[in-house]
Structures are given as structure tokens and as C-alpha cells.
Image (cartoon, rainbow, N blue to C red):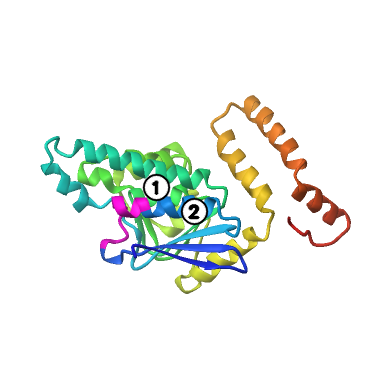
């Protein structure tokens, strides 16, 4: 299977692993479809609370499958139709990550380049080993990383994003953490446990509050500040009327652990 899924029923953590190490877990059309379907399924599964996205082998994800792209240059339209379809499908998959009500954590051990870097930037949280590296290297191939740019530019400042895009050079994990592309760097031997520990902490919180809050977070980012405050004020009222908010506040006042519904 090019994408494996392992679930811990007790914690509600779903681990999705890109599983084509021989192709550096490239985002082929098949891999994009598998990821899209897995995210769609998890989004409506009440037993899933958090998703971990990992890669098998020496790469997290090396971006699009260049052999697949090149194969379509012999099409009558020189591949234009296939390229357009693939970009639409990949962009839709990245948006599914943002719209998924479950938090998604990237666990990066190895390289994450081009659309693979975009995949990391699209996730809500990201941890990486000290051996991880990140790049948007399309400029080195005459193909500017325009679609990865969308996600990366929403994580980094303009000038840091442009430096990545214009040079195509690899960022070591420590520098990626400094710039905000990932949350933190951990030793390679600790990466799986550290990611699981973070996922477990998130999973212990109210799933209702997280669903409401994740949607609100991404929506307000593109609003003017006055509009953002008006919008999130409405969100807060909606959230306050949820049973989990009532239970959580009562538990705090009564100095006990909450019992999420």
C-alpha cells in the first residue's frame, strides 16, 4: 500500500504513513488520491481525534513525481491537461488538511521538498528530527515552486519565503524551526515518541472546541482585523453554548478533570 493507516483506538490517534520510500514518497496522482480519501474518512470518523502524517524511508516527501509528469510530455497537448488536473487535485488535497476538523501533525524525518515542503506547511503542527531538511527547489529545475509557495508563505515571513523560493537551497531542521516552518526539532530516536506525546496532549482536549477553533483560526487569517474580531466574537458565543464548554468551565470551577461529551 502506498499509504498505510494505523489507529490507536484508546487515544483516538490515526497515523498515516506515506509508503513509497523507493520514490521518496512522491506526490503522484495515486498518492494524492490516497491522502485525500484518508483525510475525508478521518474527518467524519468520531473516533479519530488527531492525525499524524509521516513518511517511510529516508524522505518525508520529495514533492511531485517528476517521472509521472515527464511521461505526459508526449501527450498531444504536451501534458498541459494532465499538469492542470494534477495541480487541481493536489491543491484540493492540501485544502482538505486545512478544512479537516481534526488537527494534523507532520512528523518529518528526512527531506521535505517542493510539494513535500508544502505538505508540511499545510499541516497544523510539525515536528522534525535533526536530520530533516526542507526546500522549495523548483527554481533549480526551471520550475518555480508556485503552489508550495502558497502554504510556505503562510508560515514564513515574505523575505524568508522568497529566499527559499529564489535560491532553492535546503534548510536544516534547526533553521526551519527558527523561521516557523516547524514547531521544533527533536533527536531522530525521539521523533516518533515526541510526535505521539504531542498528539496525545491535543487529543485529550475537547474535540468540539478544537473543531470550532481550527476552522475559525484559518478563516480569520485572511480577514481585516475588525472583521476578524467580529467573526471570532460570534464563534466564541457559538462555542460557549456547546456542552463541552459548559462542562469544561464547570470542571475548572469545581477543581476536577472535565468529562468531554
Place of residue 192 in the rendered image (x, y in percent of width and height, measured from the top left): 50, 69
Circle 1 crowding by C-alpha within 10 Å: few under 14, some 14–19, many from 20: many
Residue that label 1 marks = 118
* Front-most of residues 184 and 159: 184
Place of residue 44 in the rendered image (x, y in percent of width and height, measured from the top left): 55, 51
Marks 1 and 2, Cα distance to the nearest angstrom? 22 Å
Q: Secondary structure at mark 2?
A: helix
Q: Quadrant of residue 139?
A: top left
Residue at 61% in and 66% down: 11
As for residue 99 lying within the magenta part, the answer is no
Position of the C terminus, as image quadrant, is bottom right
Q: Earlier in the sequence, mark 1 or mark 2?
A: 2
Position of the N terminus, as image quadrant, is bottom left
Residue at 23% in and 40% down: 82
Residue that label 2 marks = 41
Circle 2 crowding by C-alpha within 10 Å: few under 14, some 14–19, many from 20: few
Amino acid at each position: 500500500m502506498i499509504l498505510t493507516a494505523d489507529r490507536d483506538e484508546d487515544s483516538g490517534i490515526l497515523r498515516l504513513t506515506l509508503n513509497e520510500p523507493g520514490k521518496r514518497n512522491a506526490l503522484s496522482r495515486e498518492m494524492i488520491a490516497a491522502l485525500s480519501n484518508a483525510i475525508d474518512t478521518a474527518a467524519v470518523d468520531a473516533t479519530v481525534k488527531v492525525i499524524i502524517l509521516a513518511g517511510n524511508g529516508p524522505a518525508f516527501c520529495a514533492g511531485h513525481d517528476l517521472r509521472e509528469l515527464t511521461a505526459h510530455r508526449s501527450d498531444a497537448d504536451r501534458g498541459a491537461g494532465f499538469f492542470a488536473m494534477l495541480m487541481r487535485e493536489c491543491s484540493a488535497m492540501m485544502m482538505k488538511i486545512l478544512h479537516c476538523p481534526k488537527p494534523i501533525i507532520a512528523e518529518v524525518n528526512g527531506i521535505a521538498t517542493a510539494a513535500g515542503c508544502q505538505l508540511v506547511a499545510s499541516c497544523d503542527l510539525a515536528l522534525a528530527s535533526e536530520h530533516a531538511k526542507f526546500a522549495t527547489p523548483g527554481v533549480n529545475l526551471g520550475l518555480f515552486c508556485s503552489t508550495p509557495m502558497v502554504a510556505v508563505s503562510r508560515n514564513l515571513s515574505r523575505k524568508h519565503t522568497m529566499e527559499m523560493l529564489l535560491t532553492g537551497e535546503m534548510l536544516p531542521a534547526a533553521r526551519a524551526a527558527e523561521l516557523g516552518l516547524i514547531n521544533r526539532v527533536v533527536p531522530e530516536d525521539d521523533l516518533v515518541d515526541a510526535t505521539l506525546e504531542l498528539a496525545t496532549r491535543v487529543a485529550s482536549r475537547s474535540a468540539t472546541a478544537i473543531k470550532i477553533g481550527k476552522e475559525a483560526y484559518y478563516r480569520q487569517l485572511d480577514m481585516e482585523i475588525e472583521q476578524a474580531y467580529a467573526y471570532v466574537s460570534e464563534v466564541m458565543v457559538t462555542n460557549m453554548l456547546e456542552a463541552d464548554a459548559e462542562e469544561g468551565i464547570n470542571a475548572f470551577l469545581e477543581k476536577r478533570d472535565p468529562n468531554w461529551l
